[in-house]
Every structure is written in C-alpha cells, then in structure tokens.
Amino acid sequence: MIRSRIIGCGSYLPEKILTNDDLSRFVETNNSWIVERTGIRERHIAAEGETTADLAEQAARKALSAAGIEANALDLLVLATSTPDNTFPATATRVQARLGMTGGVAFDVQAVCAGFVCALSVADSFIRSGQARTALIIGAETYSRILDWSDRTTCVLFGDGAGAAVLSAEESPGTTADRGVLAVKMHSDGRHYDALYVDGGVSTTQTAGHLRMNGREVFRHAVGNLASVATEAMAAAGVAPEAIDWLVPHQANARIIEATAKKLGLPMEKVVMTVDRHANTSAASIPLALCEAVADGRVKPGQLLVMEAIGGGFVWGAAVVRW
Ligand code: ACO
C-alpha cells in the first residue's frame, strides 16, 4: 500500500522575543501568574510588515532543504493558518510562487489550532489516493495581529511562528512497522463556536477583529477531546499507547499538555514541550515542536509519534506517525 512519509521538516520563528516581564509593562499581569497557569515564559512576535507568508516561506525552504526536494517537484502545498495575509487569494499561493513551485496545487486550510493535523490529513489523503506524490504542509501564524493587547486574559497566551514538513509517497507493506502516517482522525463540534473566536470578519464586520476566548470553557473540553481523539487514532493505527515514543502536542498550555499525557498514560519524558518559549502559535505549534525534537536528535527514525491538537470551532484531531 501507499503511505505518506515525512521526509523533512523545517521551522521559523521571528527574531523579536517578548517575555512575560515585557508584557507586564503594558498590561496588568506578571511572570509568576503566566508561568503558573500556562507554563509560558516568552513568545516570538513578527516584525512590522512581516506576514504569515514570510514566516511560512522561511519554514518551507528549510523543510524542502532537509528533504532534499526542489519546490518544482511538489504536487501539493497545504498551508494551515487562521491569520492569512489577505482574505484571498490563499496565502499558500503566495508561498507557492515565492518557492518557485509552478505546477500542482496550493491552498489554505482553516482549522485554527488543529490546522496542522488537518493539513497532514489532507496531504495524506491526496497521496494515498494517488492525486499527489510529494506534498508540502505548513502551519504558519501571526496571532500578534489579532490579539487585543489590552486583554490580559488572552494576549499573554499566543505567539507567532511557522513550521513545515514534506511528505512523500512510499510503497509499504501495510503493517504497523511502516514508516509514515499510520492514521489521522479529526472531529469538530460547532456548538462551541463562541467559546473561542475572532470578533470580526469579512462577512460580518468587514474588520479583522480580535481573539476572544472563554478560557475555562476551552480548558474543560480540551483534555477530554484530545485524549479521546489520540486514543481513536492509535486504535485506527493498530498501536498501543505503550508503543508511543513521543507525544508531540499542540502547545497551548502546559497544564493541558500534562493532563492529556496523564490521561493517555504517557510520562512527561515522552512529551515534546516548547510552549515555555513559543507560547501558543496555533497551526504552527506542532511542526515547531516536531522540528525542534528532530533537530536535537530526540526523534529518531522508526520511532512512533502521536500529534494532537484542538482549537476554535471546536475542531480537534490526532495523527499517528512512524518517523
Ligand atoms: N495575569 C494576571 N491575572 C490574570 C491574567 C493575567 N494574564 N488573566 C486572568 N487573570 C486573573 C483573572 O482576572 C482572575 O482574577 P479574579 O479571580 O480576580 O477574577 C484570575 O486571574 C483567575 O482567572 P481564570 O480565568 O479563572 O484563570 P484560570 O486558572 O482559568 O486560567 C487560562 C486562565 C490560563 C486562560 C486557562 O483557563 C486556560 O489555560 N484555558 C485554556 C485556554 C487556552 O489554552 N487557549 C488557547 C487557545 S485554544 C487551544 O489552543 C487549545
């Protein structure tokens, strides 16, 4: 059978770092509150004029180089973002042009913090159905542009960044020992639309709007949904939780990550954590964490990974991947 294998990844963080102490100079907060409740110490913020496409392009170039692939060899580019450069065209097409990818197709997906899992699912489906042989998936965000910097309940939680991965079709025996994507599962429940949303939009206010969140409501649903979708994906892949080498979770909040790992029976030594330095970069957070763990040698060929994420909608999903 055909499997999609991740053959390279890359990430990019804007130069500017905003610490919790920096934040406490313009909003009523403090380092110990933020660290205690979220685990976040600092976040990166895009420079003036630096856009989501700029971040995405940098991450994509590194992923292509790690994979040893020319942009022109790509059949598919899926960019997950909820902070596009423009309402349309898709930010993916801007990145496509800059990379010099002249064939294939590029488009955006919008699944907020679950965007990278969604992009992975789309690319995996294209590859397994024979529509594409080589795909680039990117999660890229500039949440600094949609934060209300006077609202301490939200502005301390997010950051900017991008991460990317190249997937390639590979003929495999079809066993759990195969390398590549073994299973992806996704869900949404739109009844929670108002728990986490942006209070503007093209069709409503004709403004970009600001992020609004009922933090407690999000927290309440996050752990249960993440643990159940990760369990569902592991069952679909035919692997037991004990076989997992690394949990690469969406980096929203250390407490959510810890509670989910505990529910899955995974010790924290098996969890990749970047939330302390990146904060929540939405669709970019999983590939940023993944790239870090690959680059520093933690993630090794043949190891089994679970990625999971939940975001506005709510939309949530999980993927089981053998590296
Ligand atoms: N600094 C200092 N005090 C603060 C801050 C801040 N930045 N923000 C809120 N407070 C205050 C509140 O005003 C409140 O004060 P009060 O008791 O006088 O009214 C007090 O701290 C407690 O506020 P709560 O909202 O009850 O704090 P809680 O323990 O629920 O933590 C948090 C809030 C961190 C947002 C938590 O609910 C959470 O992590 N929720 C999940 C949200 C999340 O991660 N969202 C990311 C997007 S969704 C996703 O990616 C999964």
Image: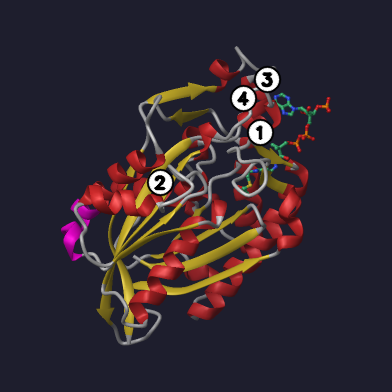
Mark 4 to mark 1 CA distance (whole Å): 8 Å
Q: Residues within 10 Å of mark 1 (few under 14, many from 20)?
A: some
Earlier along the polypeptide chain: callout 1 or callout 3?
3
Is 14 included in the stretch rendered in magenta?
Answer: no
Q: Nearer the viewer, residue 236 or 73?
A: 73
Q: Is residue 196 left or right of residue 93?
A: right
Evaluate whether residue 178 shows in this view.
no
Residue to which mark 1 is pinned: 154
Q: Which residue is mark 4?
A: 149
Dividing the image into four equal quarters, which quarter contains ligand 1?
A: top right
User: Sequence order check: which comes first, mark 4 or mark 2?
Assistant: 4
In the rendered image, the vertical position of residue 229 relative to residue 114, given as above or below = below
Q: Which mark is residue 29?
A: 3
Reply above or below: 255 against 44.
below
Looking at the picture, how far across and down is residue 286, in whole percent? Answer: 46, 51
Mark 2 lies on residue: 288
Q: The disc labelled 2 sits on which kind of residue?
A: Leu
Q: Which amino acid is tagged 3?
A: Thr
Q: Is mark 3 within 8 Å of ligand 1?
A: yes
The magenta region covers 64-73
Whole-number angstrom distance, CA of label 4 to CA of label 2: 24 Å
Q: Residue at x 66, y 31 (%)?
A: 36
User: Disc 4 vs disc 1: which is toward the camera?
Assistant: 4
Tell which tag, 3 or 4, sits nearer the viewer: 4
